[in-house]
Amino acid sequence: MPELLNSLKSDWHLAQHEAMSRVPLYHRLYSVLKAAILNGTIPFDAQMPTEQQLTKTFDVSRITAKRAMDELAAEKLVARFRGKGSHVTYHYTPKPVRGPLVGMIESLIEMGEHSIVRVLAIEKVVPPADIRERMQLSDSDFVHKTVRVSSNEEGEPYVYYVSWTVGISRSYTKRKLESTPRLKLLRENNIILTKIEQLLSATNASGRVAAELEVEPGAALLLVRRFGYTADGAIVDVVDGLYNPERYQYAMVMSID
């Protein structure tokens, strides 16, 4: 609770600084608490600070603290229980960050053009169960599985890729993959991606991956899984990228329209 109150107090000072003098004091406090609930800072079912804690932390009257909490309860963001305090009833769900696909694909192509690619394997296989489920394939459907390692222009490997792709019919050879960005080869196969979904997490390097990326087995890696969709909503391309964080950083720049 002390860490939460300190965080809320920082937001409070910011709100005070942003010329809210004409806004009633209780509404300023209500706005700070509401924002913390809506953005997940105070999660579902967490206990809210008591009126006494709010009074002491924000240097407001008990009436001001009570009215702010009453407003939250009226919006059904919190529930107040006699003897148990107030608890958050709002379920926060993180929303995916959305960005222009064209810029993303061009960035991936540009990164491919400035990387040294080494293909370790190309084969037609039945993909793992979780991939089959996402791609809506049967247990007898084959896809092209490709394993690649990309290095920077100094020859330092920074990512180990495993991809599964539906619809490959031509121009998908080791020589072509090592000389042409893979996304360009998909276009040559009339595989036009209209949406890409990315999931970021962390994993540990297996022995083989560690050897290819020149790290110790078990080293922490950034895992980026990309799902490529066509216009009809089908997933036709799944890529797992295992990145060495010492040689690759994933940066996003977001702005408010």
Image (cartoon, rainbow, N blue to C red):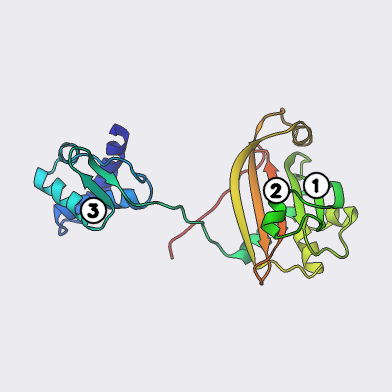
Secondary structure of the residue carrying numbered label 3: helix
Q: What type is the residue that disc 1 sits on? A: Val
Secondary structure of the residue carrying numbered label 2: strand
Q: Identify residue for label 2.
A: 240
- The reply to whether residue 175 is in sight is yes
Give the mark toward the camera: 3 or 1.
3
Secondary structure of the residue carrying numbered label 1: strand
The answer to whether 196 appears left or right of 256 in the picture is right
Q: Which of these two is toward me, 15 or 187?
A: 187
Residue 185 vs 152, above or below: the answer is below
**Image location of residue 191, percent across then percent down:** 76, 67
Residue 209 vs 89, above or below: the answer is above
Q: What type is the residue that disc 3 sits on? A: Leu
Mark 3 and mark 1: Cα distance apart in space: 53 Å
The numbered disc on residue 147 is 1
**Image location of residue 218, percent across then percent down:** 68, 29
Q: Are marks 2 and 3 in contact (CB under 8 Å)?
A: no
Q: Identify residue for label 3.
A: 72
